[in-house]
Image (spheres, rainbow, N blue to C red):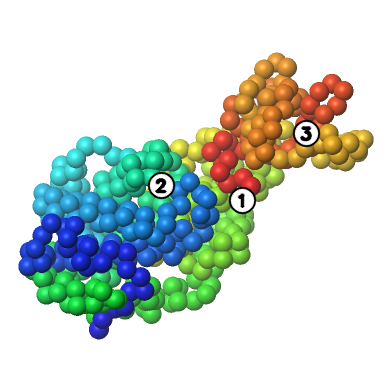
Amino acid sequence: MAEQFKKIYISPREFINSWEKEIYELNNLDYFVFLLINNLAEQIEKSYFNRTSADDLLYLHSEEIGTLSFNIGDGLQLFFEKNCFGACNLNCPIKLHDKLKENEHKERLHSLPEGLFISLDCLTKEQCLYADVLNYVVLDSILDFYNYEMGVILNESDERILSFADFCMKIILSVIKEKGQKLLNAPTENAGSLFEDLLQNDETTWEDFDVNEINDMEDEDDSEPWKNTSSAIEVTMQEFKSDYVQLSGDSHLLRYLDTFNQYLTNFLELTRFEDVNNEDLSEFFFIVLYGELVLDEHVELDDVFEVFGKLFKFLEFNHDIHLNIFFKNFTDKYACQIKRTMEISRSLLKNNSYIDALLSRAPKEETLFEGFFEITRHSKRGFKLEDIHLKAEYDPVKLQGGSTLENLETGDIIHAQIEHSKTGWRIRQFEMIYPHIARMYLY
């Protein structure tokens, strides 16, 4: 059976010419990388940047996506040659579901170069492959491409880059599982005839020989019903909630999972957890969940995060969905900031009553402004605020809060109504304080 690709990003001829090999020298690993490049590019354009504005700083057009995917494929080929099929004997690409033994863990660390962008614990060989390819191939390739090809200076701590890298890793693992097993079991075996078949159709469309006689990577696996239903997220969530209640006997925090469910299915219109990316999760935790927790002062952030941590571990071990890696890094980096601004918000809501704002005199429309205001300076006179969307500045602005205000930091974002009176600017109606990192999700 042959597989028809809808769009060619790197043609067989372009690939062979750039690979600096004669066609009779090309092997199964080369063929796998060729398949990966075009599959990865197709998914990036169709499933990642389809939700991004063309004006966005990180947006890539088709040709740029093809180049980036080629760079990632090039890096992966080198990594596989030197590590997976070279210095390391774990054979992770073809033993993805094997558990990692202690001696294998030491061998893996010994075979890798020093320095990780993201440190990840690995229980299975698939998790090891994810961590290593993410750190040594994908993040490097993405950062270099944006820095040198696009002139956009970024670093490995940028949340959107991490989200993009995670998306790419999901596609890479999918291609390895569904298209790569037979090829990667014999990576050095000659694949010249496979490339010759491709070249016959190089001028129009191309078909690649399906070495496993499997369907396209987008086809559903009928053996897993939770993937095949339009309510897959709801089904999986209910499965976890039932297990959680049985084990803990506690259900009062599960309402936040219902909020998560509504966010994924109604707001994002997703049907499968496999389609959830890091940026989706960041927006949920920084904005949606955060807003609910601020208004429920009897709930502790740590308790809610513990429930979500268990959900993501459940998804990882039961459905092979690796959101837990992102969540661990997210909580390590941002839990303290979220907790700080959440406590400030709760306190300020008590000192800046919505009822008081309603009962006070009606302000003149031309002196009233509502929006998200970043704290750019803090002094005894008050706060200097800048509207994050309109860039208008207000200085000084008075905010009632007593000692709570001492915990505010430059960069924190206040959602509020401010008005100008005879004594200067003041907060008329307070809504929320957000940590600075949430800025990109406030609109």
Residue drawn at x 28%, y 70% is 178
Q: Horizontal and vertical percent for residue 389?
A: 65, 40
Numbered tag placed on residue 300 in the rendering: none
**Three-letter amino acid code at disc 1?**
Val
Which of marks 1 and 3 precedes in the sequence? 1
**Three-letter amino acid code at disc 3?**
Ile
- The total of numbered circles placed on residues is 3
- Residue sitting farthest toward the bottom: 1
Q: Is residue 66 above or below residue 143?
A: below
286 left or right of 373?
Answer: left
Closer to the camera, 13 or 359? 13
Q: Horizontal and vertical percent for residue 261?
A: 57, 62
Crowd around label 3: few <14 · some 14–19 · many ≥20 (10 Å): many
Q: Horizontal and vertical percent for residue 394?
A: 72, 28
433 left or right of 139?
Answer: right
Residue drawn at x 71%, y 40% is 371
Crowd around label 2: few <14 · some 14–19 · many ≥20 (10 Å): many
Circle 2 is placed at which residue position? 162
Numbered tag placed on residue 288 in the rendering: 1
Q: CA distance from mark 3 to mark 2?
A: 36 Å
Numbered tag placed on residue 418 in the rendering: 3
Residue drawn at x 48%, y 46% is 57
- Residue sitting farthest toward the front: 203
Q: CA distance from mark 3 to mark 1?
A: 23 Å
Crowd around label 1: few <14 · some 14–19 · many ≥20 (10 Å): some
Residue drawn at x 42%, y 54% is 60
Q: Is residue 270 above or below residue 386?
A: below
**Snapshot quadrant of residue 343:** top right
Q: Is residue 40 above or below residue 218?
A: above
